[in-house]
Amino acid sequence: MPIVPDDKNWTWVLERPCRDCGFVAENFEPADTPSSIRANAVRWQELLAHPNVRLRPNDSTWSALEYGCHVRDVFRLFNHRLERMLDEDAPQFANWDQDVTAIEERYSEQNPAVVAAELAEAAEVLATTFERVTLGDHERTGFRSDGAAFTIGSFARYLMHDPLHHVWDVEQGYDN
């Protein structure tokens, strides 16, 4: 059964704590992004090895495998965007529809072991790119297609909520 598309503007997480997963953007130091990405990727290795990795906890929630595919693709997309922010002045980012990607890439049919390896690789590439960021780069900007503006600092905070929140999502499903 297809998931109802998520049409929330998740940039609110930069302004207030996430009531679900507990992430507080203002408490996250962008300099910690590389180590946080790597730690998150380790947790995804465990989640993607779970025997129920393909099971959706309910009809409106992705399985751990689908979330893992999404996080892998978020790491890839954010690496591309971060590279643009480092190399260009105020780049404009094309829209990315995560729900369309999930369907077109058949997230639910992918091999969990392959996804785990690809997620680990994408995490390492993104962490390494974040290691290139200097203190002077934190105010460099980029703009999402809907007009949302990011500095590299806010971009790092916004990014980290996503994979951490999805670990929380999956853990909630496994607890039930």
Image (tube, rainbow, N blue to C red):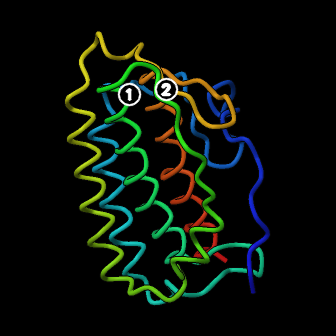
Indicate the amino acid at tag 2: Gly
Toward which corner of the image does residue 76 lie, by quadrant? bottom left
Q: Is residue 141 above or below residue 115?
A: above
Please state, as top left, top right, bottom left or bottom right, where the C terminus lies in the image: bottom right
> The residue tagged with tag 1: helix, strand or loop?
helix
Give the left or right position of residue 89, taking residue 2 as reference: left
Extreme top residue here? Answer: 136
Q: Position of residue 37 (x, y in %)?
A: 33, 47
Instruction: Give the residue displayed 69% in from the left and 27% down from the top.
Output: 16
**N-terminal label among 2 and 1:** 1
| Residue denoted by label 2 | 142
Please state the horizontal and vertical placement of residue 173, each as a whole percent of the image: 63, 73
- Per the rendering, the mark at residue 27 is none
Task: Please rate how many residues cluster around mark 1, counting C-alpha atoms within 10 Å: few if below 14, some from 14 to 19, many from 20.
Answer: many
Please give the residue where the numbered disc 1 appears in the rendered image.
85
**Label 2 element class:** strand
Residue 162, position as x, y percentages in the image: 54, 48
Q: Mark 2 and mark 1 in contact? Answer it, CB < 8 Å.
A: yes
Residue at image coords 40%, 77%: 48
Q: Nearer the viewer, residue 112 or 164?
A: 112
* Depicted 9 relative to depicted 64: above or below: above
| Number of residues whose C-alpha sits closer than 10 Å to that of mark 2, classed few (under 14), some (14–19) or many (20 or more) | many
Q: Nearer the viewer, residue 111 or 100?
A: 100
Say whether residue 132 is left or right of residue 68. left
Determine the residue positioned at 36% across, 75% down.
115
Q: Amino acid at mark 1?
A: Met
Which residue occupies 39% across, 52% down? 75
Quadrant location, the N terminus:
bottom right
Counting every numbered tag in the picture gives 2
Where residue 108 appears, as percent x and y from the top left, is 55, 84
Spatial CA distance of label 2 from label 1 is 6 Å
